Image (cartoon, rainbow, N blue to C red):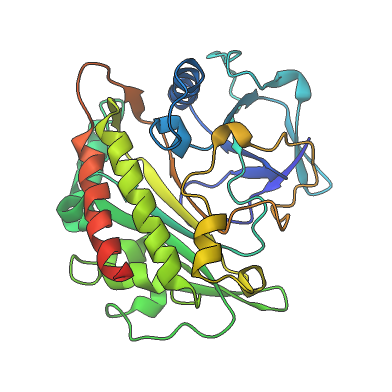
Amino acid sequence: MNFIPSAHQAAGHDGCLTAGPVFAKLTLTQEIAFYAEATRRLSVAPDLLGSLLAHWMPTYMGSMKEGIGLVEGAFVLNPDNVSLDGTNVSTSSTSDEKLYLVLLNLYHGFSHPCILDIKLGSVLTDDTVTPEKKARLAAVSQATTSGSLAFRICGMKIFHMTPLNGPPLFPNMQETMLAEPAGKSGTYTSFDKIFGRSLTDENVAKALELFFQSLRQKKMLLTRFHQRLQLLYNCLLDTEVRIKSGSLLFIYEGDPARWTDIDETKYFETDPLVCDPLDASDGESDSGSDADTGEAPLSRLNLIDFAHAKFADGQGPDDNIIDGVENLIRIFGLLAA
C-alpha cells in the first residue's frame, strides 16, 4: 500500500498520509486504545445512527508500525507491521519506529473539499503533559475563544472560483491567509491558527460564515450542520468520556459541478446527517489520490483527535466539550436562520 502526504489538511500536526480511502497519522497508544474501545462499544451495542460516539469518529481500521521509506515520492509502510483488526498494538519501539493510526480517509471522494477544524473545550490538556505545556495552553485558552466559548477555530481551507469578499475581521488578517491555485479551476485559501486565535466572541460568527461564503447553497449547508451539531450534542450528553484537545472537522464539497441541480429537497434527501462508519469503503485502491467523485457525501461532520481522551464510565458527560458544541449550535442556528 503506497502512501503520500495528505493534500488536504486545515490544521493539526504534519506527517499525515493517505492512500486512496485510507488515512494514517502519527499517534500514541492512548489514542489507538480510545479508537479501539469506541469501536468495540459500537459492535457490542449498535444503536440509532448518531447516538454513539463511534458514529461521529472516523472509521477505525487499526494501526501500522515501523518500516517507512521513501519510494518514488510515496511512503511505503511495511505490510508485515500492519494491523487492521485494532488488536495488535505494540507499546515497544525503537528510536527508528513510528506508530501510525489507520483510519478511513474522510477527504476521499471529495473533488475540492473545504475544511474547517474547530478545537473543543476550554481546558486543552490532561495530566499527561508537562507543567510548562499545561501553563502555555491555559494561557492560549484564556486569551482566545477557547476560554470564553469553549471552542476555537484552528484552521480553514476554502475552495473558491471567485475571490472571497468582505472586510477583514481584524487588523492584519491578510497575514494569516494563504492563497494557492487549485488546478485550472479555482483557488484554495487557507487560514492558519493565528487567524483563529485572533478571533473574538464578537466576530467568530463572521469567520464561520466566511467558511461557507463561496457556495451558493450555503443556507442548506448551514442548516444541515446545525442539525448535525444538535444530534452530536445529544450523543455527548449520553456519553461518559473525557476529551482534551479534541476537534470537530467540518467538510463540504467546494466543487460547483457536484452541486449542479441540487435543490433544497434533493439536498436533504441525499446528504446524510451522519455517515455510517460500518459502511466504510474496503480500501482496495492504493493510488494515493484523495479524489474519487461520486463516493463522498456532499458534506460531513466528524469528531477527531483523541490523543488525550479516555472513557469515564460513571463520571457523567464531558461538560468541557459539551459547552463548546452548545455555543456552536447557537451560532449556526443564527447563521442558518
Residue sitting at x 48%, y 15%: 44
Placement of 200 over or under 71, stated as above or below: below
Residue most extreme to the right: 72
Quick check: 111 left or right of 2? left
Q: Position of residue 36 (x, y in %)?
A: 50, 21
Q: Position of residue 317 (x, y in %)?
A: 22, 29
| Image quadrant in which you'd find residue 306 | top left
Viewer-nearest residue: 268 or 331: 268
Q: What is the quadrant of the N terminus in the image? A: top right
Residue sitting at x 61%, y 38%: 104
Residue sitting at x 57%, y 59%: 298
Residue 145 makes an appearance in the image: yes
Q: Position of residue 313 (x, y in %)?
A: 27, 17
Q: What is the quadrant of the C terminus in the image? A: bottom left
Placement of 40 over or under 135, stated as above or below: above
Viewer-nearest residue: 49 or 186: 49
Q: Position of residue 330 (x, y in %)?
A: 22, 59
